[in-house]
Amino acid sequence: MVNGEEQQQSICNALAEFKVGVDNAIFSVDVAENRVLVLLLKRQGEPDLGQWSLPGTLVRRGESLEDAAYRVLSEKISVQNLYLEQLYTFGGPARDPRESPQSFGVRYLSVSYFALVQHEEVQLLAESAETMAWFPCDRVPKLAFDHNEMVKYGYQRLRNKLEYSPVAFEVLPETFTLNEVYQLYTAVLGENFADYSNFRSRILKLGVLCDTGMKLSRGAGRPASLYRFDSEAFAPLKDKPMIFI
Amino acid sequence: MVNGEEQQQSICNALAEFKVGVDNAIFSVDVAENRVLVLLLKRQGEPDLGQWSLPGTLVRRGESLEDAAYRVLSEKISVQNLYLEQLYTFGGPARDPRESPQSFGVRYLSVSYFALVQHEEVQLLAESAETMAWFPCDRVPKLAFDHNEMVKYGYQRLRNKLEYSPVAFEVLPETFTLNEVYQLYTAVLGENFADYSNFRSRILKLGVLCDTGMKLSRGAGRPASLYRFDSEAFAPLKDKPMIFI
DNA sequence: ACAAAAGTGTTTCCTTTACACCCATGT
DNA sequence: ACATGGGTGTAAAGGAAACACTTTTGT
């Protein structure tokens, strides 16, 4: 096997050597402020020292890409519920300044991951607000490497996911009110996709939410029914085309 | 910079070294036979010699991932119009048998690409039917590595793309009849998504097709109008949510 | 004249949209 | 009692599904 590789090397010695990293575009929705946030980190080392960037790491031996993504995540934040999926892979030459011509063709490839967490639940670990902070998606500064592209890509994915998948419920608490769901949707998709009344009927008609019977009172006003996502009811609908709102 | 790297290595010597490959899931639609095909290649070397697989290659120095994808494509087939986009990245440890424990942790990561070509137009280059062939998507044999997963993923992408993007027109000739479009859609999505009459009205109402005024006669029957995809009319609709059928 | 392929129209049904209204609770 | 947030209902508009029908060609 090692022989086979040496042979291949000699036939075609132009193969690139890669270091592989993962970068996480971690989003959360601040329903109170009605905005979508992305977690940024100030770079502590070269290259691009001092610039804001996505939390990332290089992949270790024996570690899968997803494992690496989870590792960075757990190093930076503490959170109960989260949704994670692969986003896009950036691997062009010269995307990382470390790829100098002198470095014998070592390339830096990055597999970006999309993550969604519940804003209220997240705890930022260790670092100060100076070095790690939530930025509104429409006010993201110039980032290191090609991370701006990753954020843009991820934000788009978030909007799509919300429309045709039940991601929202991955990041909502076990039980929630329909208003909480509605606020999450409006924060992400804007206020012009449906009014509350119609949102209600549509999402209930899907048949994937069930009323727990419990009520939640918030000061004045009628108490809201608490619902639960019924993953059993959703299972047969998985893989089928369906629209959440 | 070389110093920086050595330093990093010593601090964390568990980083994985990667070879990066691209694998292409190349699809075409045989409208005559009403089926979707994927291009497979019999492996000529170890590992998995003799097994069917997707056409792929390792990425060379100075070559972008997309460049590599185009290179494999042009090595295997000759085609005028094609659509290509990144699909998914597979990078788990032990996904390639070459990743033996003795190989000092060298990992094989693969970025898969999705391609769509016009079946009638494609010319298979060089190799015989024994070593390269179109397989119906529902009759794909056991493939090398994790290529079955790639095909599955790509086939799903094809169906989604057809529904909410104008990919179809990337792979149709400059001018085409509405029936040709319809047949492409039915072959991919099945016959139960709309009848021809309704398909017609819907796709014309989008306003992205324009009648060239030319007619195409095919033996008996009324000649069909030849249409052209109007990319200018589509431009403002890009990025907006829209449904092609 | 008739078959074959292309294109048009119509009727029915269902979903979406906009909006008005009723219900339960705290102060 | 009334303000506040939660929940229900309905009428009008729009779009999808099914299917009948007309038009234009070749033989």
Image (spheres, coloured by chain):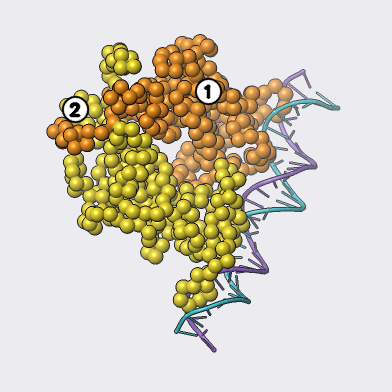
Chain colours: A orange, B yellow, C purple, D cyan
Callout 2: helix, strand or loop?
helix
Residue A110 located left or right of residue B227: left
Measuring 48% from the left and 45% from the top, which residue is drawn there?
A237
Amino acid under disc 1: Lys
Alpha carbon separation for disc pair 2 and 1: 40 Å
Measuring 47% from the left and 63% from the top, which residue is drawn there?
B180
The label shown at residue A132 is none
Q: Residue A162, percent across and down?
A: 54, 37
Viewer-proximal residue among A83 and B164 = B164
Residue D19 located left or right of residue B68: right
What crowding class fits label 1: few (fewer than 14 Cα within 10 Å), some (14-19), or many (20 or more)? few
Q: Residue B161, percent across and down?
A: 47, 48
Callout 1: helix, strand or loop?
loop
Residue lying at the far left in this picture: please name it: A3
Image quarter where the C terminus of chain B lies is: bottom right
Residue lying at the far front in this picture: please name it: A101
Residue A208 located left or right of residue A14: right
Residue that numbered label 2 is attached to: B103
Amino acid under disc 2: Ser
Residue that numbered label 1 is attached to: A142
Measuring 42% from the left and 30% from the top, which residue is drawn there?
A112
What crowding class fits label 2: few (fewer than 14 Cα within 10 Å), some (14-19), or many (20 or more)? few
Measuring 58% from the left and 50% from the top, which residue is drawn there?
B232
Quarter of the rendering containing residue B225 = bottom right
